[in-house]
Amino acid sequence: MRIDLERDDEGKRLDKLLCAKVPGLGRAAVKRLFAQGRVRVSTEHGGRRRAAKGDVAVAGWVVELDVELGDAGAIADPEAPLTVVLETPRMLVLDKPAGQPTAPLEPGEKGALANALVARYPEVRSCGFSPREPGLCHRLDTDTSGLVLAARDLEAFNTLSTALKEGRLDKRYRLIVKSENLPEEGTIDIPLAPHPKDRRRVLPCLHPRDVQRYSPRPASTSYQKISEKDGFALVEARAPKALRHQIRAHFAAIDHPLVGDVLYGGDASVGITRQALHASRITWGGDAVVPAFDLVSPLPADLARLVGAE
């Protein structure tokens, strides 16, 4: 894709300019394109180079994007599962089952929550972090079940996604770990970084050397034990600014990996086929854009069975 920069574009940051000029291309997608070297600029003097997201636009430049927008968006799939817990004119709360991806990873992929969402609420395409995440204010891992927020217009999306980023939405999770030596409550403050050797995982940076080497992001998870049964503990956790795999990595770091979470060392011999993690509650105090709500999703049957919570 080619974009000719004009006089009105002069002085604007290139990454923000692309978000404004390319419909459906969100901030996260633009960031990935820069990181992957898929944005190049040709200057008025004939030079051509890889662009950086902090570059400032110059009139006369040509920006080349290595992206096929026709394949970039989530395809409407009315057959994909969609459970709506709350519907208002501006937003939705959905209950995602374990095993369903939140968003498609590949062009043309179907079955994800995003595919189901655009089939029933096509207006969500007006917002989101990328065309493959229409309306979605956050994501859950494929094998994590529970509540997901989606917006139906840009103003609601900005309100909810900003509140999530700033930790102003109360998100709670239910999880199951081995109960032995687990304190009744606690807080896990361990920064997290992308794992240097395994892209599937994140790295809890426990040692100062790792903090210096990998520049991790701060992460805090507080928890309280709810009940115990047959050596398992049902735990409620809160992670206001939850990073990727935060809860999974944090409990593994304190030697209590989630039951079924083989990626982080969890016990896979207990009869469940996924990590025992469920996004169980989400609460918003409300503002002028999105009214208050407080919603709960019950523990799914596969997890409830382990702790006698059927």
Image (tube, rainbow, N blue to C red):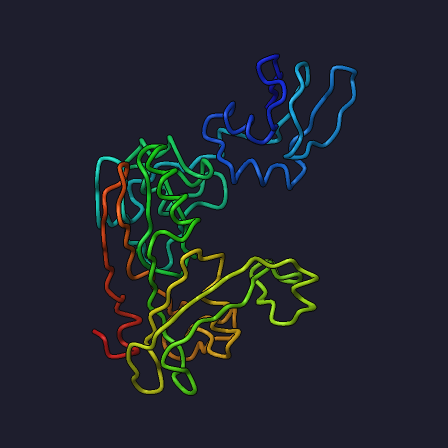
Give the answer, above or below, for where 246 lies relative to 21.
Answer: below
Q: Residue at x 65, y 64 (%)?
A: 211
Front one among 8 and 108:
8
Front one among 310 and 157:
157
* 29 left or right of 98 in image: right
- Number of on-image labels: 0
Give the answer, above or below, for where 129 lies relative to 195.
Answer: above
Q: Quadrant of residue 18?
A: top right
Give the answer, above or below, for where 143 lies relative to 101.
Answer: below
- Can the viewer see residue 310 in this picture? yes
Q: Residue at x 51, y 29 (%)?
A: 19
* 45 left or right of 118 in image: right
- Can the viewer see residue 120 in this picture? no
Q: Residue at x 63, y 22 (%)?
A: 11
What is the x, y in percent for residue 1?
Answer: 59, 24
Front one among 304 and 47:
47
What is the x, y in percent for residue 62?
Answer: 66, 19
Q: Residue at x 29, y 76 (%)?
A: 226
Which quarter shows the C terminus? bottom left
Q: Quadrant of residue 5?
A: top right
What is the x, y in percent for residue 177?
Answer: 40, 77
What is the x, y in percent for residue 217?
Answer: 56, 57
